[in-house]
Amino acid sequence: MTRVAAIDCGTNSIRLLVADVPPQGPHTDLLRRMEVVRLGQGVDATGRLAPEAIERTRVVLAEYAAQACDLGVTATRMVATSASRDAANRAEFESMVQTTLGQLPDVVPGREEAELSFLGATASLAAAAGAHRHPAPEPPFLVVDIGGGSTEFVLGDSSGVRAARSVDVGCVRLTERHLHDDPPTADQVRRAEADIRAALADVVAEVPVAEAGSLVGVAGSVTTVAAIALGLPAYDPVAIHGSRIPVGAVRSVTAGLLNATRARRAAMPVMHPGRVDVIGAGSLVLRVIMDVLEMDEVVVSEHDILDGIVLRLARG
């Protein structure tokens, strides 16, 4: 058994997983944390990470480093994704991480980000299906990871990844670019949808999505939509992991979120405070993907890039 820590620093949130990983089989979580630091605040418009965003990230990263040390991890890997890839002042961010964590972040390209998400998302799908008394989802899997700045698409099965593509449509980026009113206007939503459809044309050109047997959705936008669709009285990752949400329910939830005021979204019992401002865009990404790719349902995974990082870190 190997005890390792994974840190995923995205455009919207920074997350920690400390886990014990055996040579084979499922890993055991010791600690999971997620804090919204909005590292990508304004980066789509300015091309730079804001100093206050870097500082918010530093404060949480220092807590994560201390907790990982206290739990006796043997190795830590921090992966930084879309926001830091895009930033002109990426070196300032990397210097902060080196000082705080004692090592540089891996600013991974979109392809590796997608592969790690695929590994994490699919490792426990069969077990989750059994817990819900569902048949196991059919491979090949098209894993879609909707982040703050980008969305990753990766097609694969038990033999590995067949194709992957990362595109610059994410819930923070689309919100800052288009969804300015509360609630957003129909024209703002149309412009955001046009961006998503244009990005999907690039995905379809590179990834043979028609081969997919199952659509697997990961990350906070997808899991929040699932929690609302399931009518949960509070956010419950056990109930969400492995659930299957039909496209009609995704359309209904998305319409409700885009028509709701900020106050109404914030009052939803499953809503994380850090997702209130961006969940409309995140749900729109999921809905458009399912409509364009003609997917009848999405299999929801609570496991994602964090789980992929710990598995690869421990097993190579």
Image (cartoon, rainbow, N blue to C red):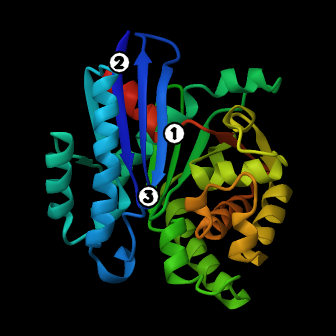
In this rendering, is residue 189 above or below 308?
Answer: below
Q: In the image, what residue type sits under mark 2?
A: Arg
Q: Which residue is mark 2?
A: 3
N-terminal label among 2 and 3: 2
Task: Judge whether residue 42 can be spotted in this image.
Answer: yes
- Say whether residue 91 is left or right of residue 151: left
Q: Quadrant of the N terminus?
A: top left
Q: x, y percentage for residue 240?
A: 72, 39
Q: Which residue is mark 1?
A: 304
Q: Which residue is mark 3?
A: 166
Name the residue at 32% across, 29% down.
68
Name the residue at 40% across, 10% down.
23
Callout 1: few (<14), some (14-19), or many (20+) C-alpha neighbours within 10 Å? many
Residue 261's image quarter? bottom right
Q: In the image, what residue type sits under mark 1?
A: Asp
Name the residue nearer the viewer: 184 or 168.
184
Callout 3: few (<14), some (14-19), or many (20+) C-alpha neighbours within 10 Å? many
Q: Quadrant of the C terminus?
A: top left
Q: In the image, what residue type sits under mark 3?
A: Ser
Callout 2: few (<14), some (14-19), or many (20+) C-alpha neighbours within 10 Å? many
Name the residue nearer the viewer: 230 or 197.
230
Element under label 3?
strand
Name the residue nearer the viewer: 222 or 198.
222
Q: x, y percentage for residue 255?
A: 79, 71
Q: Nearer the viewer, mark 2 or mark 3?
A: 2
